[in-house]
Amino acid sequence: MRLTKLEHAALVVDDSGDKLYIDPGKFTTPITESAGAVAIVITHEHDDHWTPEQLRRIIAANPDVRILGPSGVAAAASGFPVETVSAGDEVEAGPFRLRFFGGLHAQIHPSIPIIDNLGVLVDDALYYAGDSFTVPEGVAVEVLAAPAGAPWMKISEAMDYIMAVAPKRAFPTHEMLLSQAGKALSNTRLGWATEQGGGEYLPLQPGDSIDF
């Protein structure tokens, strides 16, 4: 199974030609080559994690693709056939086994309402928590998509989160708001945190892939 990091929070997982997209939003290059997509997971409703345009492009190439997300996504994307999922749910989508965790977005500021957010575990191996620090309790995470920069986080929080998950491998996501200097600093800190649990940190760039 191959994971390819796209820009910002977007990922694509390929299993023998079947593809799972996660969080294709506005900071991600338009997805125009999506043949084989069987499912799209949207962790929450913010537009850096999904846009109507990205969904339409994927659906145009894959009319039967399934779209899964929490109730906030179903409401925001009311023109699309979103299947509502909740924490604790397990879904089989093509060859992919999806398990969902959490329920709420990390707080940005007390003045801003907290919205729905779900973390997703793919095939009991790849975990991405969306905009949260939800730890998938009882799961030995093989690959963790770790947040590198966002209005809702401090780097110390991301470091503590990685150490709590203790993945075998971790790579940065949610970093398009960072400068090159910011990305380098974040990679240093997140790399240190990954190593504390005996894991390996992979400073993936958009377009880079790993197998798991």
Image: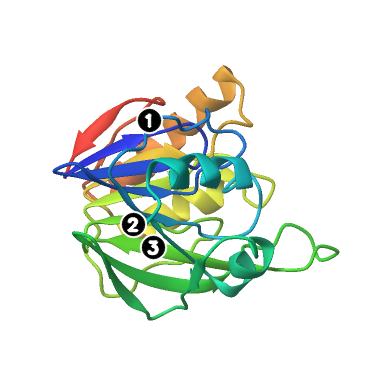
Residue 144 picture location, percent across and down: 33, 50
Work out whether residue 51 can be spotted. Answer: no
N-terminal of the pair, mark 1 or mark 2, is 1
Is residue 77 placed above or below 13 in the rendered structure?
below
In the rendered view, would you say 58 is above or below 101? above
Circle 1 is placed at which residue position? 33
x%, y% of residue 197?
A: 26, 52
Residue at x 61% of width, y 28% of height: 178
Q: Quadrant of residue 26?
A: top right
Q: Quadrant of residue 108?
A: bottom right
Furthest residue in direction right, as rendered:
111
Residue at position x 53%, y 47% in the image: 55
Whether residues under marks 2 and 3 lie with C-beta atoms below 8 angstroms apart, the answer is yes
Judge the density around disc 1: few (<14), some (14-19), many (≥20) Cα neighbours within 10 Å: few
Taking 212 as reference, is 114 left or right?
Answer: right
First in sequence: mark 3 vs mark 1: 1
Mark 2 belongs to which amino acid? Tyr
Amino acid bearing label 1: Glu
Give whichever of discs 2 and 3 has the lower sequence position. Answer: 3
Identify residue type, mark 3.
Val
Q: Which label sits in the foreground, 3 or 1?
A: 1
- The quadrant of the image that shows the N terminus is top left
Cα separation between marks 1 and 2: 24 Å
The count of marks equals 3
Q: Residue furthest bottom?
A: 88
Which residue was labeled with disc 3? Answer: 120
Out of 4 and 138, give the one closest to the viewer. Answer: 4
Q: Is residue 144 found left or right of 7 in the rendered image?
A: left
- Residue corresponding to mark 2: 127
- For mark 3, give the secondary structure: strand
Question: Is residue 48 left or right of 6 when viewed as pictured?
Answer: right
